[in-house]
């Protein structure tokens, strides 16, 4: 099969199209003939050498795919050989064939293309487990999303709005403010020209938000704390602003605040299967009804992966960048 490997740590140019053997399946895995694969920030970190794959995962980048199951063990699932699915993978998505735990596969929602479906798993699994499970966003609560124009951000905005929550989102331009508001955000905040802490105080009449989905960390830590309502929760899923911060812990005690976080890739297939089942129950009907949708910014044939990662590095996209494979 053709695959895209990282020849050495570095920029987009280190991504190389090579010939590889098809994956050897483990118990409980299926083989997917890939039609499309999503590009995500962890792929960039892996390319740069700062985010190695788990020990038992493929060394190839790629955490989400869409395609057809052509082989494997589907026992214990409702899947069968020949089904079109999208799947969360621990690696190996940048290839014509990819192995994935059967329980981490979901049917492509009715009405969605393979390209759209390839933009679902990494973002929807991440948002569900962090915003709704770990962050425990409840009915009528307020969510603040940092990085609102990213794949994660556009997903979080739409899901929270679909469940009736108020959502605010920080973004880096006025164009993106318009984009996230068009997706349903009650207010987009341009962090380059506005102080999001002051904006949140004004918008919430001084009360603050209940949950913050944070991809920045670093110096955002205290600003996030100052944006929370009492009993509020911060969920950290990335550290684009650095991993170190000095915080006022007295606020955590006095106001009963929670700071938590998680990474999805190292978690067990069984943990991800539980998320998949929740998504199929609560979210797939919303996708099939057209109430929410993956936001696709651009697609590239897999041979143009360097161009795709160059766009990702520039950080100007709104939504997902997808690689496509010929079938």
Image (spheres, helix red, strand yellow):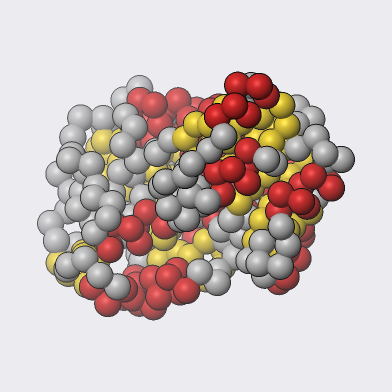
**Image x and y of residue 269, in percent:** 33, 30
**Image x and y of residue 250, in percent:** 59, 27
Q: Residue at x 55, y 69 (%)?
A: 317
Q: Nearer the viewer, residue 166 or 242?
A: 242
Quadrant of the rendered structure where residue 16 is? bottom left
Residue 157 shows in the view:
yes
Q: Nearer the viewer, residue 52 or 297?
A: 52
Residue 71 shows in the view:
no
Q: Residue 136 vs residue 123: left or right?
A: right
Q: Nearer the viewer, residue 243 or 236?
A: 243
Q: Residue 153 vs residue 301: left or right?
A: right
Quadrant where the image shows the N terminus: bottom left
Quadrant of the rendered structure where residue 2 is? bottom left
Q: Residue at x 66, y 67 (%)?
A: 192
**Image x and y of residue 259, in percent:** 53, 31
**Which residue reaches farthest right?**
205
**Image x and y of residue 22, in percent:** 17, 53
From what the image shows, is residue 251 above or below residue 318? above
């Amino acid at each position: 099969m053709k695959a895209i490997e990282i020849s050495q740590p570095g920029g987009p140019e280190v991504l190389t199209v090579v010939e590889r053997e098809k994956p050897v399946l483990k118990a409980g895995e299926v083989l997917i003939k890939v039609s499309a694969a999503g590009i995500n920030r962890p792929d960039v970190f892996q390319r740069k050498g700062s985010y190695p794959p788990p020990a038992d995962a493929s060394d190839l980048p790629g955490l989400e795919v869409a395609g057809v199951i052509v082989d494997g063990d589907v026992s214990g699932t409702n899947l069968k050989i020949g089904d079109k699915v999208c799947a969360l993978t621990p690696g190996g998505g940048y290839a014509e064939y990819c192995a994935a735990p059967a329980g981490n596969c979901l049917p492509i929602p009715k009405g969605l293309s393979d390209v759209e479906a390839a933009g679902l798993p990494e973002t929807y699994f991440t948002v569900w487990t962090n915003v709704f499970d770990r962050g425990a966003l409840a009915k009528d609560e307020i969510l603040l999303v940092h990085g609102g124009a990213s794949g994660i951000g556009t997903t979080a905005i739409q899901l929270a709005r679909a469940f009736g929550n108020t959502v605010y989102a920080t973004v880096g331009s006025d164009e993106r403010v318009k984009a996230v508001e068009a997706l349903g955000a009650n207010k987009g905040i341009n962090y380059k020209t506005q102080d999001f802490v002051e904006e949140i105080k004004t918008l919430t009449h001084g009360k603050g938000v209940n949950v913050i989905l944070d991809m920045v960390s670093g110096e955002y830590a205290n600003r996030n704390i100052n944006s929370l309502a009492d009993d509020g929760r911060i969920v950290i899923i990335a550290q684009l602003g650095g991993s170190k911060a000095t915080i006022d812990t007295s606020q955590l005690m006095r106001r009963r605040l929670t700071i938590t976080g998680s990474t999805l890739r190292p978690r067990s297939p069984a943990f991800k299967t539980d998320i998949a089942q929740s998504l199929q129950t609560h979210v797939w009907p919303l996708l099939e009804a057209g109430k929410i949708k993956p936001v696709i910014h651009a697609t590239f044939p897999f041979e143009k992966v360097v161009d795709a990662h160059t766009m990702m590095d520039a950080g100007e996209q709104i939504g997902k960048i997808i690689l496509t494979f010929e079938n």
